[in-house]
Image (cartoon, rainbow, N blue to C red):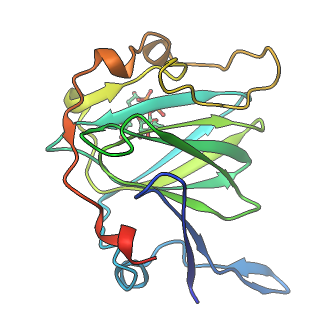
Amino acid sequence: MKMQIETTPLPGVMILTPKRHGDARGFFSESWSRETLAAQGIELDFVQDNHSLSEAAPTLRGLHFQAPPRAQAKLVRCGRGRLLDVAVDIRKGSPSYGRWTGVELSFGNGRQLLVPAGFAHGFVTREPGTEIVYKCTDTYAPETEGAIHWADPDLAIDWDLPRGEEPRLSAKDAEAGRLADLDSPFTYEGPLPWENRT
Ligand SMILES: Cc1cn([C@H]2C[C@H](O)[C@@H](COP(=O)(O)OP(=O)(O)O[C@H]3O[C@H](C)C(=O)[C@H](O)[C@H]3O)O2)c(=O)[nH]c1=O
């Protein structure tokens, strides 16, 4: 099996873990293959790869999204270090609207998180020098970007921060508003194709 596919408590958000072919040199893995995912009902065409380094820990980036028609699904993995990756359902009318899930991604566990369009995405790093790499199904469109505050009390995300430590943030993220004050540009259109297959 090339890719282990697991559900999370948040419908539509999936954990994809590629098989690592180990040998005396180290390992090889296919981190993404359109064919492998399509066979599981996950037909996504990625058009941009992103890579960011966060020097200090905890650094928190998010919660971000691009609005339709430039919405992005993302396939996220941790190239170096360790992070908690978080997705929030912001599709109006969704049975899981406003719910979040968090999964630890690390170079060690090789896990990847599939964040569908319609979900806000953010992460907090757990080691210095953590790198994140992720594929997106649309290109960068800053005019469509939206943000939700990482500590939105209605979301009540448990970022599991070290006691009393404030995360390093961008000014944009520090000033983000609450989901309740956002007219989300996303509307629930029913279960995602892969929700009923796994
Ligand atoms: C997202 C993006 C940014 N940039 C430029 C714009 C700024 O000059 C610089 C940093 O951008 P920003 O502060 O928005 O980067 P992050 O805070 O890491 O934002 C990302 O973090 C969360 C977790 C995400 O899921 C999104 O991909 C994205 O919003 O990179 C680009 O040139 N292309 C891009 O696609």
Q: Measuring 73% from the left and 47% from the top, which residue is drawn there?
A: 82
Q: Measuring 32% from the left and 63% from the top, which residue is drawn there?
A: 46
Q: Quadrant of residue 63?
A: top left
In this rendering, position of residue 85 left or right of residue 152: right
With respect to residue 44, does 96 lie above or below?
above
In this rendering, position of residue 96 left or right of residue 55: left
Q: Where residue 114 sits in the image (x, y, percent)?
A: 46, 58
Report the residue that reaches farthest toward the left.
Answer: 69
In this rendering, position of residue 107 left or right of residue 91: right
With respect to residue 83, does 12 lie above or below?
below
**Which quarter of the rendering shows the N terminus?**
bottom right
Report the residue that reaches farthest toward the front.
Answer: 95
Splitting the image into four quadrants, where does ligand 1 fall?
top left
Q: Nearer the viewer, residue 54 or 59?
A: 59
Q: Measuring 72% from the left and 58% from the top, which residue is drawn there?
A: 107
Q: Where residue 130 sits in the image (x, y, percent)?
A: 69, 42
Q: Nearer the viewer, residue 94 or 59?
A: 94
In this rendering, position of residue 114 left or right of residue 77: left
Q: Quadrant of residue 37?
A: bottom left
Q: Where residue 188 sits in the image (x, y, percent)?
A: 22, 47
